[in-house]
Amino acid sequence: MRTITFIMALIMSSSIFAQNPEELKVKNTVIQFFEAFHKQDSVAIREVVSEDITLQSIGKNKEGVTELKIENFDNFLKSIVSIPKDKKFEEKLLDFKIRIDGDMANAWTPYEFYFDNKFCHCGVNSFQMVRLEGVWKIIYLIDTRRKEDCK
């Protein structure tokens, strides 16, 4: 009897935490973006973003004042591709929170960034997406960046 109760509880709890198919597609779009990012593959990155993507970052300047920086997408791609192949960089995604309303989605992904296996900064990515012709595309990406209060 205990075994049956345990199995039923396991089935019920797994269905509560299961993502729906569209949430998985949104999550996979983010994963594809970072797989291409880590491979320095600008062509693959372009496949998951819209043509008019907007990139922004929130951080602090040298005086400690919050700044909002707008980044040109082509310059972003050039900077990624130009990282020397002997340098390792990794953005570790710590979690996914996904919200969908019709053809609009948001993925909230806390992260830690490492360069040459050394902690560089942490923050949160917020991906805004739209479903175009059945495919989720990233239209807006904003992130925060900080060196403290990362846990």
Image: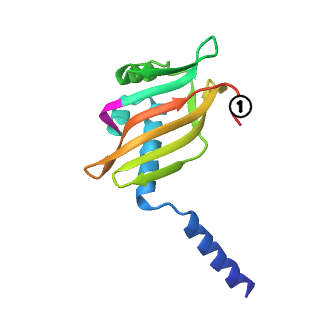
Where residue 21 appears, as percent x and y from the top left, is: 42, 60
The quarter of the picture where the C terminus appears is top right
Please state the extent of the stretch shown in magenta in the rendering: 49-53
Q: Amino acid at mark 1?
A: Asp
Residue at numbered disc 1: 149
Local secondary structure at mark 1: loop
Q: Residue at x 60, y 74 (%)?
A: 12
Whether residue 35 sits left or right of residue 43 in the image: it is right
Q: Is residue 65 left or right of residue 57?
A: right
- Toward the top, the furthest residue is 63
Image-quadrant location for residue 47? top left
Task: Let me know if residue 52 is in the magenta part.
Answer: yes
- In this rendering, the answer to whether 98 lies above or below 38 is below
Q: Residue at x 59, y 14 (%)?
A: 61
Instruction: Answer yes or no: is residue 35 visible.
Output: no
Within 10 Å of disc 1 (Cα), the crowding (few <14, some 14-19, many 20+) is few
Name the outermost residue toward the left.
133
**Could you say where residue 110 lies in the image, as x and y percent from the top left?**
59, 39
